[in-house]
Amino acid sequence: MSNNLLLSSGANIDFMIKGVFSYQLFGQTVWITTTHICIIIVMIAMISFCIAASRAMKKATEVPSGFQNILELIVEGLDGLVNGALGKFAPGFRNYIGTVFIFIWLCNTSGLFGLRAPTADYGTTLALALITFGLINASEFKYHKASGYARNLFKPMAFFLPINIIGKLSTPVSLSLRLFANNLSGIIMLAMIYGLLRSFAYVWPSFLHAFFDIFIGSLQAYVFCVLSLTYINNACVGE
Amino acid sequence: MEFNEYFVLGCSAIASGLAVFTAFGPGLGQGNAAGMAAQAVGRNPGAVGDIRTTMLLGQAFSETSGLYGLVVAIILLMVRPLTNF
């Protein structure tokens, strides 16, 4: 039954993750799926963009022009997002939030190039949300020490401990499920249109791509970053 | 009547249909938020940018409960956790 997540469903409607090849690791079958391949493609795109960007910034001029304009726009936008939410705690988190935003945005819009968006796999989004979860707890440890962390668990009264622990653990679940389900719903809608209206689906689905991939994708990347920033801010400031 | 695997599959299909019905709540909420945003723009046309950002963020949060329903429906249909007997 667990193979159903890997193999395609019936009819022409096909939105599932497919296994490309498998190998044995410590007696377990490990599948390399389309998600891994799409993530590698996204990573190659990101790395080549970064190399081009650092080359362009080596001969940066006082008055920006062309490619330098775009780079400054991206960096200033992301820095403004982090600075606005975190204030004096911002410097440590700019790198993480900027990277995650660009990565999620590229993953979400990769549907435009015929890839299956890697963020529509629960493994990807859970990993991202767990990194954020670790960062939240690490910054709470850093700014409140162990005693403050323990005290925060017993707020406002001692018997709130189980509720506080559930609240902490639900953070990565809600973060990851939001991103996952938004992208999955877009993929299902497009797969249904391509599968069921095969003979009519020519130019006009591009509007649906613009909505599901670009609009919802950008919005969800933004929402993920803003929510991460809000949680991190709560952990840093406390009280 | 025989309670075999196919009976459970049919029940799963009904249950997944009911799970998708959670979209009812976020639909109402998002419509409400958009209406309120329209009112706010009418009162203060200068703050269109801020209002749009706040509205989209709030809608994205309230969408989550509907998306949980979608996830439950897809798990019921595709993973079929109830038929493992």
Image: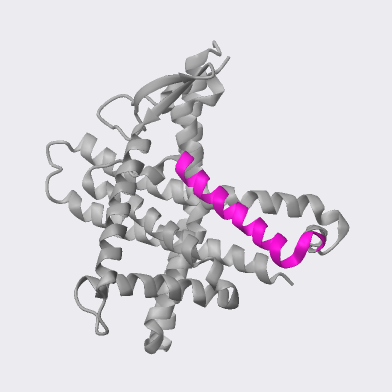
Measuring from the top left, give residue A164's x and y in whole percent: 75, 55
Q: Split into 4 quadrants, where in the image is the C terminus of chain B?
A: top right
- Residue B82, picture quadrant: top right
**Residue at x 67% of width, y 56% of height:** A137
Reply above or below: A135 against A66: above
Magenta segment includes A39: no
Measuring from the top left, give residue A110's x and y in whole percent: 28, 49
Reply above or below: A86 against A25: below
- Would you say residue B60 is visible in this rendering? no
**Residue at x 81% of width, y 53% of height:** A161
Q: Quick one: A184 or A201, which is closer to the camera?
A: A184
Measuring from the top left, give residue A66's x and y in whole percent: 19, 74
Magenta segment includes A125: yes
Q: Residue furthest top?
A: B2
Reply above or below: A89 against A174: below
- Residue B38, picture quadrant: bottom left
Q: Is residue A120 left or right of residue B2?
A: left
Measuring from the top left, give residue A102's x and y in whole percent: 37, 59
| Prevailing secondary structure of the magenta residues | helix
Task: State the extent of the magenta-drawn residues as a range.
Answer: A123-147
**Residue at x 28% of width, y 32% of height:** A13
